[in-house]
Amino acid sequence: MNLRDKVFILMTASSACAYAQSEDVLKTVELNPITVIGTGTYHKADNTPVAVKVISAKDLKDAQVTNLSDALTRLTTNITTHTNGMGSFVNFNGVSDDYLLILENGKRMSGDDRWNRISMSNIKRIEILSGAASALYGSEAIAGVINIITDESKNKVEATNFTKFSSHGRLDEDINVDVNSGKLSSFTSYNHKEADNWLVNHYQEFKEGDKQVLKLTGRPMSVGFNSENISQKFEYKFNDKFSVYVRGNYYDYVTERPQGATYFTQKATTNKETGEKTYDYSEKIAYTYDLHHKSYTYGAGARWEPNKDTHIYLDVYSDNFVSKYNYWQTADKEEYDVTRKRTHYTNETLKGIFRLNSWNKLSAGLEFVQEALNSESDNIEFETTNTYNAYAQDEMQLVGGLEAVLGMRYTYNDLFGSQFTPNAGLFYHMGGFRLRASYAGGYRTPTLSQLFATDQAKTNSRFTIPNSALKPEKNDFWNANAEYSNNWMSVSVSGYINSIRNMINYRTLTQSEIDKDAYLSSLYADGWTTIRQRDNIDKAKLKGISANVKFILPGGFSLNGGYSYTDSKAKTVTLDAKTQQYVTTETPVDKSVMNVANVGVTWNHNWGDYYLNVNLNGHIQGKRYSSTYGYAPRYQQWDLNTRHTFVMQHFTLEPSVGIENLFNQRDNSFWNSNFSTINPGRSLYVSVALKFKG
């Protein structure tokens, strides 16, 4: 290896985005990254007592992904996405992302746009923990936890710019500037995204008996938008033992719906004498408003390490989100805004990690959380809830290669009282073999919206009343994992059972309940034919198995693949309108997918100062179940990416060219179908990244 190769490696190894000094080092970087999410303490991935999937910065660059949901869908098999008329949603281990906790550098993200507030060009790694983790992380960690670790350079100056263009006006722009001057460091990140509206099928379908009628629709499958996201962090290191930081983030997102778009509604009229039906169609304006989301996050913290066996962390931060309906000006109405949702999330955490002796490490902490919600559209003036937490987790080396983890969290919430959530795990390793088994209890407190929202749907005469008597949802998660790895390969198999109870769903009130309550009776008299409230009426059981392989082969090739199988059963309570009796039905969990597979092939080679990376990535997905629409069809998407790296003295230039959706797989179902994918079809993209290090 020549001198220029070594210089290039030293420039890029910190972000795992290029290549290592030797074949052995490359294998280590690829197969055994650092992770912290499983236990809250640092471990190599193959030595963490809890199984964790890690996506590296190099993986993200190879796949050329520009948003978090695409990255997780293409590079894991536990996560799928789906889209309908209400927007795009994520499913994790068979359940919705309501049961998934997302962290950025260990800090909880809240608000509707938490998936979009991450700059992908500034990620060092993504850690994915499958399973309940409430003992460490509290509410929402029922299906799993995702922790995004951002990259903070140690160079005096490091600046990067990344720009990507694709079809349908899709643009992604990232700028990152890191400066280290003595004891003071500054980390700045800016991201801009935009896209146009697009439709794959321009028609909506109606039935006139056995006859099919098609009408043009202007409602897009994917809504155009503009977003801006900027983050700033300052850190001051007094010495090796003590440092402090302050940070902030501002995010702004506005949809750009087509203002002139129309759609049709159908009305059937039956002739009383002949019984013959006639159909009338009315053309209506599709949209009257854009959605406008804003969030700002600010916080501060300190790290104190008085000795090598004691680490103390203090973090205080607030995540604030507001979503508004921006109504357009029309012939009879002026432009105005309505606050759809305003949330405030405040977190104060004091955490300590103590190595008590050579075989025992204790993590313990105190945490205070305050949440607040205001919503004009849901008739919520101002509601708050406070949560007080204390937790401890012990990592113990028992005998030989056997380790154990025991943890417990105590939670007191001023609306729901006390909760205890335990976790326990065993980890055995010998040579390249790893065996893990664990149990964890989880819980999810009802959201303030679920507790207090009043919803009125005039189109179907449905009225939803609040229910302040909701209970937390709880689950038991059992997991087993077997893994083998060496310096050129990694193979793992995991299985889990997840039992969730007290799940919250809408319950339609019986006529008897309505008649006994004066308020409900008045609603019924006003024409609301369906009156409902949220209640703890459902439960689910999910069983799954997943397998992952990764090989680093001669000649610069690497191969990886994964497969997940999920068997889900949900018991749902519904009201029979005729008998006025509640009926329990069993179906797959809503939006769950039974079979998912991913395949990736990468080739790296260099000629002096020029490096070439070629990546072929495939995502193969089975039918997705919907409780409303039935099954969405199977689909697969293959992407071909090429990245070209040119190394100069202080600069690295990386242009990329590729084809997304190589085989032009599209779901051209009619509007309001259960789409398997909203991808617009085969698209050529170009991108360029420029990095400066000084």
Image (tube, rainbow, N blue to C red):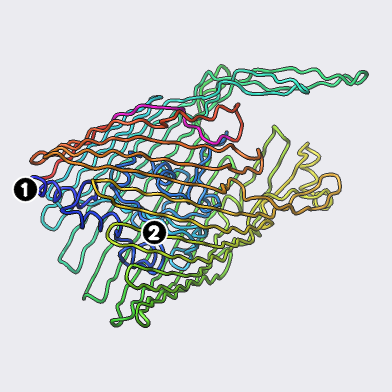
Residue 559 point in image, percent of width and height: 34, 48
Residue 348 point in image, percent of width and height: 38, 63
Q: Earlier in the sequence, mark 1 or mark 2?
A: 1
Residue 298 point in image, percent of width and height: 34, 51
Residue 494's place in the image compared with 228, above or below, is: below
Q: Which residue is mark 1?
A: 3
Give the residue drawn at x 88%, y 19%: 271
Please, what is the three-letter code of the amino acid marked with disc 1? Leu
What label sits on residue 491 in the rendered view? 2
Give the residue drawn at x 51%, y 35%: 677
Please, what is the three-letter code of the amino acid marked with disc 2? Val
Q: Nearer the viewer, mark 1 or mark 2?
A: 2
Most common SS among magenta residues: loop
Image check: 358 left or right of 86? left
Q: Quadrant of the C terminus?
A: top left
Give the residue drawn at x 51%, y 68%: 440
